[in-house]
Image (tube, coloured by chain):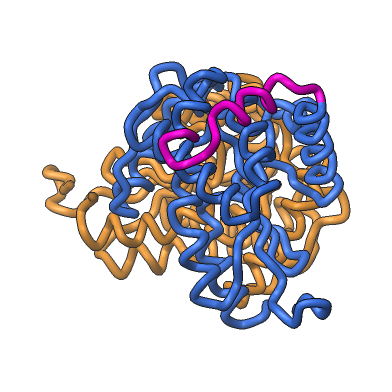
Chain colours: A orange, B blue
Amino acid sequence: MTDRAEGRLAPIMFYYDYSSPYAYMAASRIDDIAAAHGRVVHWRPILLGAIYKLTGASPLLDQPIKGAYIKRDMERCARLMGLHMEFPENMTFAEIAPARATVWARDQGEDQARKLGGALLNHCFGTDGNIRGVDEVVQVATGVGFDGAALSAALASDELKQRLRDDIDAAMSAGVCGAPLFIVDEEPFWGADRLDHVERWLATGGW
Amino acid sequence: MTDRAEGRLAPIMFYYDYSSPYAYMAASRIDDIAAAHGRVVHWRPILLGAIYKLTGASPLLDQPIKGAYIKRDMERCARLMGLHMEFPENMTFAEIAPARATVWARDQGEDQARKLGGALLNHCFGTDGNIRGVDEVVQVATGVGFDGAALSAALASDELKQRLRDDIDAAMSAGVCGAPLFIVDEEPFWGADRLDHVERWLATGGW
């Protein structure tokens, strides 16, 4: 599908949550996959907690039996991808500050949202760094060239809170039932383990 | 890992639920994958309801937003596999009778459990046939050569009920957190979408 106004292929929507190791894995590959097919990726952080309220799901790692399996699967998937991954000490954490910061970065361009999003995920899962609080998020953002004072001010604003809420509502209306989730030309693919389907869909136009 | 007593490679354990289209997909491929690596598969039906009680999960297709996505994913996965699949009219049904029947068939050999399991899944998902009740299960079993009268008698016995319960308890103790789930040499793989990992694990011995 082309964006007729610009004569370009439509972007791939990438919905993710900053507390998810699977998001880190997906983020490490989605831009390259998209680029190989002439696409760009629009990074859209969401809060899984908001979606769980609607679907009735709960964090995978918190579930009896399943939590142990999921941790094993995450580590096995990362090894297979050749991706270094650290588990944050406390896996279920409030991922509000990094999500809001990414909404703010988007005002400077989709590429800036991508840059900040990648930096935050790498800090968290690549180095076991903290991205829970405003100070830590501002520090990571400053480290990759963003204006820390402007970001701090924005993170304190009600406007940014509302914009993240609106993004999440829009995502749920678009059928985002979990994360990471990709939408390619209105076709949703849920899970880092659907990247192979995303690639094939881009190459073939669907099946 | 070899079974030293018999000098053979250990079987692959295949845990599945008769109400799951993903189980149908997995069942259509697992024996061929195993055979290519000199393995056999031991089919072990379980009841997802029993596992959900422990993990707190609920049937995927019943969840808001997620249900619609999952149906789409199931159909897309089946198309990609070149597998004809029908959705039973009422997707969430009691799958107790087919599971008990498969425990009974196992007394005649693992290959017999496999034969009956495959016939039941194909009847349900290949032809939109009914496998909910005892009569329907006996009819399918008779169609592939089992002794219908003996199966009917067994399905009415308390012993068979208890054996299925014991199987499910053993599965949960082995870490079965959902289904379909495969265990290869103590390594669990959950989901029809992990068949590629199962194949790679068999080929490489792990990573």
Position of residue A35 measured from the top left corner of the image (x, y, whole percent): 32, 67
Residue A89 visible in image:
yes
Instruction: Give yes or no for residue B149 being in the magenta stretch.
Output: yes
Quarter assignment of residue B48:
top right
Position of residue B170 measured from the top left corner of the image (x, y, whole percent): 83, 45
Residue at (44, 61) in percent of width and height:
A30
- In this rendering, the answer to whether A47 lies above or below A122 is above
Position of residue B44 measured from the top left corner of the image (x, y, whole percent): 67, 46
Residue sitting nearer the eye, A36 or B64: B64
Residue A166 visible in image:
no
- In this rendering, the answer to whether B197 lies above or below B51 is below
Quarter assignment of residue B202:
bottom right
Left or right, B159 with respect to A171, comes to right
Magenta segment range?
A: B141-158
Left or right, A180 with respect to A84, comes to left
Residue at (56, 25) in percent of width and height:
A165
- In this rendering, the answer to whether A76 lies above or below A133 is below
Q: Main secondary structure of the magenta part?
A: helix
